[in-house]
Amino acid sequence: YNADTKGMLKALWELPEQCARAWELGMAADVSPMDDLRQVVVTGLGGSAIGGDLLRVYATQRLDVPVVVNRDYVLPKFVGPHTLVFAVSYSGNTEETLSAYSQAREKGARLVVLTTGGKLGELAKNDGVPVITVPGGIAPRSATGYLFIPTLAVLYRMGLLPDLSHEVAECTSLLQSMREKLKPEVPLDSNQAKMLAASFHNRIPVIWGSSGTTEVVAQRWKGQINENAKAPAYWNVFPELNHNELVGFEFPGELLRRLYVVILRDPQDHPRVQKRFAITREIMEGAVAGVVEIMARGSGALARMYSLVYIGDYASVYLAMLYGVDPGPVRVIDTLKARLA
Ligand code: PA5
């Protein structure tokens, strides 16, 4: 393992403790209850936005107001004094997020910032906006605990969600036991993440989740394969994909044989969606390189989400190793940001 791969594996190993620490950071934030809250907006990009999506899915059946994720310079028109905006940027220097932060200020929204520092941290400090300062030194996408779990603690402190400390504790201990089976020392034939990486190697991973349960995890797997393994991957969700994507599997051929499909499952998937998994699988089996189903573990929604995130994160790093690339640097994103400067 080179230093970069070791760094990424270390961050992965430490994810369980990161989740526990992230809850504490959120609990320590200087926030007060808000009258007449109508919406929550999470604004950020890439690795800093995925936490917003995790919150959106987590909160859909638990929060009385909608959560909207904004990956843009511009905030939606509805944002105003009754909106809580989480501005999230690991580096604190992402121009779209800085722009959305300024707009939130102009519109009189309530703001909470999550960052390691940068311009966003500085601005928030000067503006008297509460800042949750998360530890630096890892890739933004390795900081998914830091960039999501504090938002749950803030919503609890504002009286909008129940105390979720027991869910965070369950998540932490589940991931601690899972890492013993996913770590590099565990050989291929008993390491689920290595087996997945081997199945993805020289193929195109297609990751399918379900609306309301595993949809964001599927998106996360795709992003991790892109950014860590520098490889293409695609994602979609049930039941929507049964109304379009499946049609593309009708004519078996060389192209389809390059696809390796993963169906991410959750015990809370709608019963009709569970039936759709089985029928879909029957329809396409044989046409693609392989189909595998992975069931979420744990009882709380947080543990179930992270159990799947964890397997995908490890698999993406093992895939990077198979392709012989450094999982850490995302040079093409850096180049693009530099050219825009
Ligand atoms: O994972 C990454 O490195 C990227 O997706 C970044 O998160 C993205 O470019 C936004 O940067 P930041 O998280 O620093 O706001």
Image (tube, rainbow, N blue to C red):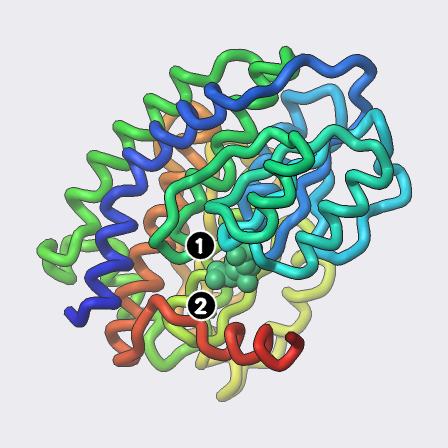
Looking at the rendered structure, the number of numbered marks drawn on it comes to 2
Kind of residue sitting beneath label 1? Arg
Looking at the rendered structure, the secondary structure element under dot 1 is helix
The correct choice, above or below, for 102 with respect to 332 in the image is: above
The residue lying toward the viewer, choosing from 231 and 124, is 124
- Please give left or right for residue 45 compared with residue 300 in the image: right
Quarter of the rendering containing residue 154: top right
Residue 260: mark: none
| Residue underneath mark 2 | 227
Residue 141: mark: 1
Indicate the position of residue 160 as horizontal and vertical percent values: 65, 16
Kind of residue sitting beneath label 2? Glu
Label 1 near label 2: C-beta < 8 Å? yes
Looking at the rendered structure, the secondary structure element under dot 2 is helix
Indicate the position of residue 143 as horizontal and vertical percent values: 41, 47
| Rendered-image quadrant of the C terminus | bottom right
**Mark 1 close to ligand 1, CB under 8 Å:** yes
